[in-house]
Image: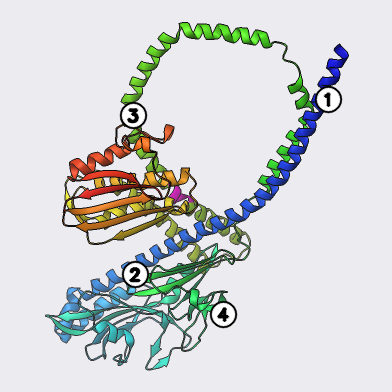
């Protein structure tokens, strides 16, 4: 009889071990197939994330440069010395001194000129090269036929005209060696009469070098018709050196963006094209992943995991033997558990009382936890927005070290890399200011627009939404002006959008979308925030605005939607409601005009 039991146990152990082994072989094969698919998918997601951030940073940099250039132009236009010269040309000495001072202060300015109402230059200072010494032009020219003069002359006082990036032409001839130029102009009026045009010409090559510098992407700039302006360190002009974008990149003309903020993404060739604003014009920019910088996941990590699985399944034989051994102390364990159950029954009342007291303490901490959760949300968003600039700073420092060790750290490359580093640092500083202003409590009520509150929220949470590939669609039927504390209303929008984001992420929606729709009628405004996450369980709809009620289990405090209801009803005199739409939950805010 004992021999028979031994044989049965061995057979069971052998079958169990073979089952584990076969299952392990199949699981490892599926694991490697899945890992290869996942690597390709993650590489595409990484490219999209990196290129969106790159484009956003470059657009921010371009806006800052244009803003600085416009302020400088207006500071000259409204300077008392220049205004005196416009009113009376006898004050030309004061205007010349002002022009020289401005040129000395800005070494990237190529020309500063005042063109009279007839199109003829009245005063002009030149610089032959970046960082060269400015001088007064002896021979003045007729610019009445130039497009930037004609277009600027049609503007109102204080408006800024942005030119194309083109070659410098003097006396009707192309200047050689070729000098790419970028201009900003503004009309000059005195007592309502048009007196001429004030223009700043800058060396486009310097700003384009800063705009296109990137350790990861090559940048190509082209116009609406598809003619290249800048590519691979070289400038082009459609009249003198025409080059089509379709010759440089594998993209057809019908796929090129046309309108502002249009974009084109080719994940197979790692190309991203976007139409971004450049003053009163549109700049078309293509980002192409540099050769040799393909963003690869570490396949070694998957191989290491596969080795671990292999070791586990090779140990199937001894493991199955241990599992198949009879449990000798089964009755002792059952008896011990019975005694523990009896002890638990006797002490249940005491435990219930202790648990009740513990829950009371937790209730008092909920509001405090809500504040900590808000702080954690802010820190998490800051960390998310800082992660990519810090990565770029690390890459720049590594490249500086490598170039220095090889003796290839030229001054121009060093300046370009330092400019990129400063750009990243400025972005991080700007991020801190945005978060500080958002969470700073307002002291008084003011008039503000719904669009301003929405944009403030997107500055806080926009990067996280883009990182999670969540699309936000904003539509507004009419202008909405509200009166109150802007930060309180922005907090309402932030809570609703953040809740939608959490639901979309938790349920892994394949094409996540958040819509914010604004409608107007005689009774007031109706603002609807919807998602496509499937909705809220019906049994929770009636309790969703109760304090301390949450559907997020341990991650929720149950205070967010309660605060939304309180702010809308008590601070703005409105109403808030929720229903399940066709694709997900829809929160509606009704506000009086």
Q: Residue at x 27, y 78 (%)?
A: 99
Disc 1 element: helix
User: Which stretch appears magenta?
Assistant: 383-387
Q: Quadrant of the N terminus?
A: top right
Q: Which residue is mark 3?
A: 366
How far apart marks 1 and 4 lie (CA) works out to 71 Å
Mark sitting earlier along the chain (1/2)? 1
Q: Point out the residue furthest to the right here.
A: 3
How far apart marks 4 and 2 lie (CA) works out to 30 Å
Q: Which mark is residue 66?
A: 2
Nearer-the-camera pick, 231 or 537? 537
Mark sitting earlier along the chain (2/3)? 2
Q: Is residue 208 above or below residue 508?
A: below
Would you identify the image quadrant in which residue 62 lies? bottom left
Q: Position of residue 61 (x, y in %)?
A: 40, 64
Would you identify the image quadrant in which residue 65 lies? bottom left
Q: Which mark is residue 247?
A: 4
Instruction: Check disc 3: other Cα within 10 Å, few if <14, some if 14-19, many if 20+.
Output: some
**Pair 2/3: label in front:** 3
């Amino acid at each position: 009889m004992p021999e028979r039991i031994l044989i049965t146990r061995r057979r069971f152990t052998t079958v169990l071990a073979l089952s584990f082994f076969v299952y392990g072989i199949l699981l490892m094969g599926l694991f490697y197939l899945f890992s290869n698919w996942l690597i390709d998918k993650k590489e595409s997601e990484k490219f999209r994330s990196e290129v969106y951030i790159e484009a956003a940073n470059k657009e921010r940099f371009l806006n800052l440069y244009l803003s600085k250039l416009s302020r400088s132009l207006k500071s000259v236009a409204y300077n008392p010395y220049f205004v005196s010269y416009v009113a009376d040309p006898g004050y030309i000495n004061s205007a010349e001194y002002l022009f020289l001072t401005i040129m000395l202060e800005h070494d990237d300015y190529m020309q500063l000129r005042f063109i009279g109402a007839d199109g003829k230059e009245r005063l002009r200072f030149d610089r032959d090269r970046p960082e060269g010494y400015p001088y007064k032009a002896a021979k003045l020219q007729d610019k009445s036929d130039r497009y930037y003069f004609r277009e600027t002359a049609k503007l109102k006082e204080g408006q800024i005209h942005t030119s194309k990036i083109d070659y410098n032409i003097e006396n009707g001839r192309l200047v050689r060696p070729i000098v790419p130029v970028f201009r900003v102009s503004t009309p000059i009026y005195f007592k309502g009469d048009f007196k001429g045009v004030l223009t700043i010409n800058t060396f486009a090559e310097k700003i384009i070098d800063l705009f296109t510098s990137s350790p990861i992407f090559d940048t190509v700039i082209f116009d609406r018709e598809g003619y290249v302006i800048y590519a691979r360190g070289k400038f082009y002009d459609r009249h003198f050196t025409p080059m089509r974008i379709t010759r440089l990149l594998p993209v057809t003309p019908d796929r090129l963006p046309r309108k502002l903020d249009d974009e084109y993404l080719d994940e197979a060739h790692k190309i991203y094209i976007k139409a971004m604003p450049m003053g009163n014009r549109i700049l078309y920019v293509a980002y192409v992943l540099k050769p040799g910088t393909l963003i690869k996941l570490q396949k070694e990590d998957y191989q290491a995991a596969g080795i671990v699985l292999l070791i586990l399944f090779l140990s199937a034989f001894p493991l199955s033997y241990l599992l198949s051994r009879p449990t000798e102390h089964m009755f002792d364990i059952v008896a011990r558990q019975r005694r523990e159950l009896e002890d638990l029954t006797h002490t249940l009342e005491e435990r219930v009382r202790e648990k009740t007291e513990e829950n009371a303490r937790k209730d008092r901490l909920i509001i405090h936890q809500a504040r900590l959760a808000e702080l954690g949300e802010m820190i998490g968003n800051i960390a998310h927005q800082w992660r990519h600039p810090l990565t770029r700073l690390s890459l720049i420092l590594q490249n500086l070290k490598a170039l220095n060790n090889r003796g290839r750290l030229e001054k121009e490359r060093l300046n370009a890399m330092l400019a990129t580093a400063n750009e990243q640092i400025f972005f991080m500083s700007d991020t801190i200011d945005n978060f500080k202003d958002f969470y700073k409590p307002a002291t008084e009520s003011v008039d503000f627009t719904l669009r301003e509150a929405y944009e403030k929220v997107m500055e806080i949470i926009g990067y996280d939404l883009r990182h999670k590939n969540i699309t936000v669609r904003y539509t507004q039927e009419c202008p909405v002006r509200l009166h109150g504390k802007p930060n309180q209303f922005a907090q309402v929008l932030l809570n609703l959008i953040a809740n939608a984001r959490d639901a979309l992420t938790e349920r892994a929606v394949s094409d996540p979308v958040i819509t914010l729709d604004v409608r107007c009628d005689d009774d007031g405004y109706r603002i609807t925030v919807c998602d496509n996450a499937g909705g809220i369980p019906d049994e929770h709809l009636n309790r969703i605005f109760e304090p301390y009620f949450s559907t997020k289990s341990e991650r929720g405090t149950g205070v967010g939607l309660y605060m939304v209801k309180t702010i809308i009803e008590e601070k703005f005199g409105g109403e808030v409601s929720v229903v399940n739409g066709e694709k997900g939950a829809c929160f509606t805010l009704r506000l009086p005009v």
